[in-house]
Amino acid sequence: MIILKEILVFYEKFVLIFSLTYILLFVILGITAFIAVRRYLHQRYFIQDDVLLKSNYVPGVSIIAPAFNESVTVVYNVKSMLSLNYPQFEVVLVNDGSSDDTLQKLIDEFGLVKVDFYYQKKVFTIGEVRGHYKSEHAVYSNLLVVDKVNGKSKADASNAGINSSKYPLFVCTDVDCILRRDTLIKLAKPFIESKERVVATGAAIRISNSCEIKDGLMVQTHFPEGWYPRFQELEYVRTFIFGRMAWSHMNSLLLVSGGLGMFEKEVVIAVGGFFYKSLGEDMDLITRIRMYLHEKKEKFKIIYIPESLCWTEVPSTYKVFIRQRVRWARGLFQTLVFYKKMFLNPKYGRTGLFILPHYFLFEFMVPIFELIGVIMLTTSFIFFTPNLRWFIDLSLAVYFFYLLITIMSILFDDIMYKSYVGMKEIGILVFYALLEPILYHPVNIFSSLKGYYLYLRNKEVKWGNMERKGFTTTK
Amino acid sequence: MIDIDEFLRHFIIPEFVFIFSMLVGALFLYKFYYDFHTPKVKLVKKRVDEFLTGLILSYSDKESIEAEIRGFVKEIPLHKKWCKRVVLHKLMFLHQNLRGDVTKELYYIYECFGLYEFTLSYLNSWFWNTKCEGLVQLRELKYKIGKDYALKYIGSKNQTLSSNAYLALMVMEPDDLDFLIDYSHHANYAGEINIIDFIHHNKPPKPKNLNEWIYRNEVTTIILGLKFMIFYNFTEENKKILELLRHENWEVRHEAIHAISVLSIFEGEDELIELFYREDRVENKIEILETLKSIGSDSTKIFLTEILNSDEVAGIKLKAVFCLNVTNKTYLIETFEGNDDVERMIKHVNIKYI
């Protein structure tokens, strides 16, 4: 009993120190994010978008969009991508062995014909490429459809897209994503402006559930309906506005979302493209790029821009949500295991000494600490008389800190982007923010723990089988 | 533990609750202000649009313009910064879209509204980004009176400010771009794009010292010089351009290769073929092949055949097929008949939809 008591006291102290460190880290991140956003907004006077739009000197961009059974939205989404504003770009849609009529819909809508494309396998792919399709209509001349056998991963489909693309930069996106018209300019700008080598850029992703879309273009953003999408809205705002901007400012981004990221093709080919076995291919790629460039002792930047450029449909049911988060958790676990040699290794600079330890301690371990916390608390209630007052006070402090971060992110977001229409939507957001730590956070923790467990059991994972509802289409 | 508990209970938690309430309040207040303010701004914008368009098209004399503006400022909250910005942006829009003498009237209107003083308040600000905004205003209006401010910030250590000052000066003094020879240490690729965009759209006279630019040590000056030479079809320094193929900086070599193509420097063919073998940048190898497509002769044919029979990477070979397909299609088909890989490349380059 005495030993048990000592363990409980030790854990209590540990949680206190850990929480304080966590809070301190978030305060630093908050200040850094604020500085970074200010700097970004001031930088807009350097080169204007319309100058880039008219220029022959901007690097070409290939948009790579893998599609697996996306028949409901694929036509709209391709149209959305084709309507982007940029001097030279192509859309490379990879049909990853869809079992529905995704390819047929594309053939019918865009007048596609099979062509004798000279396919170069610059990065490894598993699924064999069955053919390339181009449109007979000049208006769709920048569309290339790659038809391949399913390689059981988005990474494999993306690699086939990289092999088929022709421009030095490429954007990786999901086919269900709706992109803002100036997405390519905004993402390419850091590559053009920076004196240092930029290898990847990313931007904020927002939720498209309930938004109005016409011909693949966003007409009106709406606050999402339903519990899960609304909680995810809060989570996305917090992550993209608050976290990533700060990490970018410290040149320490380890994740450029699979939903929207622009990459230098040369470096991606040099590291072997996306890893087909990866469960979190976006994080894996950035980590591998970092490892490669650190080993080559080259200076580089990975930049995040505080603009909402992409809208994506998020899981709206418990089942689909859990499946997505379990996959993310497994991806995190896998990345940390794969790149453990970088961990605390000075050879890998800030990635080894700062970024990976942070991900390990404050991302990977948090669900485990919380689980241990619940066990400790239960034990304490069963065998001892716990200090309830202390427990409630600590919980309240953490709860309100969590709320502060969320509300600050919403305020930041609303000042910059005016994403929400009217006071009602703000009211709903605040209400959901109050509930989020109690209702949503435990589900997230459960998914992460399940993901870790499944990773340890080495169970096979499938990607992209999300049931899509399609969009509200305006006339 | 008790002390920390007390600290949490009496300081941290109330503090957090207070900040939380403040933030929620600010969120609602901001939304309320925005919803309340936006229709007002829209209304002012509409009135400013109507007034300025009417004023410009009425071709009135200076006295009438002044009188009308005096009357109009009573109808809008011109003392507010946002309102001044609305008027200024409309004037900038009109200046960009109107041609001829009417721009002189625009300057007069700009002064009558007291907007030059407003621009000066930007230019004299403590903050570099505000100064940049002032320079953008001068640039958009091509308001030469503000030239001294552009000159003042040209030497700034802040790259964005200096770049904006250079651009403003270029726009205000387009007839004398000789000063750009000193731009190099401030410029990056984005700066070059800005300058090239300006010369493409305004077609100013060629700088008198252009022939000196490619003799400078600064990489940016050389690259800009080559770009200007391409734009002005300047062929007096072809020999020096060929020498630049041996420059240590790959971007300079790249621009020199491009210049050989656009300026059709046929004597560069052998030099380019030589360079291909020692060049380590794929971009430059591809640019060489692209250039040989337009200036190549029999030597190019032999060279490309060598490339296609070598162990070069597929991307380079594909470009070589593109090149040979344009310069000597029959030769390409006959020579590589039976070579499966090259035949597939030939099929690729002949896809009519690519």
Image (cartoon, rainbow, N blue to C red):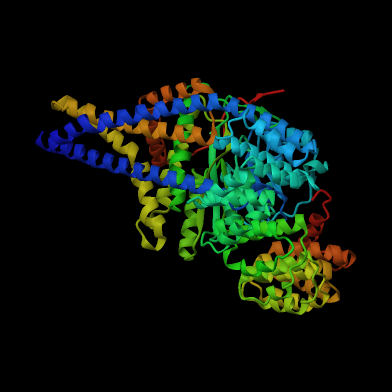
Query: For this view, does A343 lie left or right of residue B291?
Result: left
Res. B17 in view: yes
- Residue that lies at the very extreme toward the left in this rendered image: A2
Count every numbered label the image shows and give the total. 0
Comparing B215 with B45, the one in front is B45
x, y percentage for residue B349?
A: 80, 57
Rendered-image quadrant of the C terminus of chain A: top right
Comparing A381 with B49, the one in front is B49
x, y percentage for residue B332?
A: 85, 66
Residue drawn at (79%, 68%) of the image: B261
x, y percentage for residue A400?
A: 32, 30
Rendered-image quadrant of the N terminus of chain A: top left
Res. A93 in view: no
Residue A235, quarter of picture: top left
Placement of B319 over or under A161, stated as above or below:
below
Placement of B155 over or under B118, stated as above or below:
below
Placement of A238 over or under B308, stated as above or below:
above
Query: For this view, does B314 lie left or right of residue B342?
Result: left
- Residue that lies at the very extreme toward the right in this rendered image: B330
x, y percentage for residue A358?
A: 36, 48
Residue B220, quarter of picture: bottom right
Placement of B296 over or under A44, stated as above or below:
below
Comparing A362 with A55, the one in front is A55
Comparing A457 with B191, the one in front is B191
